[in-house]
Amino acid sequence: MSFPKNFVWGAAAAAYQIEGAWNVDGRGPSIWDVFSQEPGKIFENHNGNVACDHYHRWREDIGLMRDLGLKAYRLSLAWPRIQPTGTGKPNAKGLAFYDRLVDGLLEAGITPWVTLYHWDMPQALQQRGGFLNREMVEWFGDYAEIVAARLGDRVKHWMTFNEPPVVMGLGYHEGKFAPGLKLPFADCLLGAHHLLMAHGRGVQALRAGCTGPVKISLAHTSRERIPATESKRDIEAARHDYFASTERVMWNLSWWADPIMFGHYPADGVKAFGADMPKVTAADLKLIAQKIDFLAYNCYSGWQVRADAKGNAERLPGGWGTGNPRGTLSWLEIAPEAPYWAARFQAQRYGLPLVFSENGYCNTDFVHLDGKVHDPQRIDFMARYLRAIRRATDEGVPVAGYFYWSIMDNFEWAEGYKDRFGLVHVDYQTQKRTPKDSFYWYRDFIRSGGAKL
Ligand code: IFM
């Protein structure tokens, strides 16, 4: 069978990873500006000061998206461009940039899907405690109000936060990402709670400030559990493990998704985390559980799970086996079944349609002697993952869209510019854009309505 008729074919990027222009037109410093200036934090001390210079080259980039035939483009807004210190009067030039970008996309027939927070918090807010400060709820709400008032007449698809496990896990717990903190687990649970409340406040502000109906979500991520066989026992073991919240990490999907969808934290986690739990009131939970309209999910990799003799989940030893194909980032083991199980498990548990807000493959692509960028691995990766998504839609699992990560090579956080995810190659010395083979493959695929697999 084929993909549903109105399936959204998109690609994504995020402000700090592509915009550059870090100190232009009144933009304030973000936690990533500060973190990436610290020697040793980022591969070869790269930073996002210039990145893909999308701030100045957005017209050319929209032209590429139009050539690609994108139906939708997922972008994020740089909060410090809009409110340089995170609170107070908006910066007119920052808002004007996003105004132009949104208009340009709409003129090109591309629907903007906007994420409010993709990790670049204004540094001034971090200095006031960042997510550990409960005032974050109102700071974020005010920011969402400003954005809704300015873009809400044209933008109808929103995500509040991108990948909370990375924000709190890598940023506040493991110290690998900005702001580089290594806080006790209890503090991370408190920050997570404030983040979820800020999400709720953001949803309220977007609904109140945008004109007409809007579709809102939060982009989750986790690591997929893939049943080792399709026996009922393995499937149930994988499902149970997928939604368990007992590990003392920030990666438990149900920890983030259940409060939004069910209005309470998962009982297994509340029990396991015991005294580390923050104080949670009924009013907090009510705020968090604002109605959302779809599940947004960033899906990359996962591992196989089987049921042991007692039916408990057991991760298969050795993951996928020595030498399993992967991207240049070590965590990106290729697991083509991942989106199928992610969509099936989540749609069943949460009862909403799911959009893959990110999925992509990284490599060390370069321009070949013939002037082209040949990236057969990426094409193969996309074809495999898209087949799994088609299997889901064939079986009636409600998947509504797919955003390839990323439209172009960009600043891959702590890995700098080393790993390339783009459909478009970027030469960071000259800013020359070269569409890769995968760009043309995806273009033909979109033209065929997803039939060409
Ligand atoms: O580049 C990131 C993106 O910012 C968030 N999701 C994962 C991508 C690849 O690591």
Image: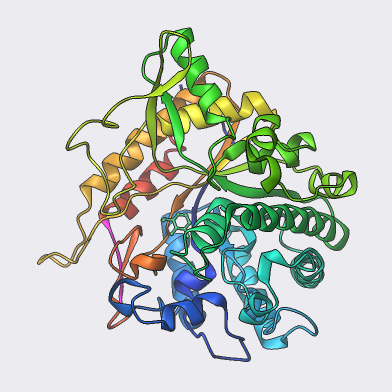
Residue at coordinates 19% horizontally, 63% vertically from top-left? 372
- Give the quadrant of residue 328: bottom left
Give the quadrant of ligand 1: bottom left
Can residue 389 be seen here? Answer: no
Residue at coordinates 33% horizontally, 79% vertically from top-left? 45
Left or right: 123, with 41 as reference point: right
Q: Quadrant of the C terminus?
A: top left
* Secondary structure mostly seen in the magenta stretch: strand
Image location (x, y in percent) of residue 35: 47, 77
Residue at coordinates 47% horizontally, 28% vertically from top-left? 340
Left or right: 396, with 66 as reference point: right
Q: Which residues are magenta?
A: 432-436
Is 346 a magenta residue? no
Image location (x, y in percent) of residue 406: 42, 57
Left or right: 46, with 251 as reference point: left
Foreground residue, 274 or 173? 274
Image location (x, y in percent) of residue 175: 47, 64
Can residue 243 be seen here? Answer: yes
Residue at coordinates 47% horizontally, 66% vertically from top-left? 177
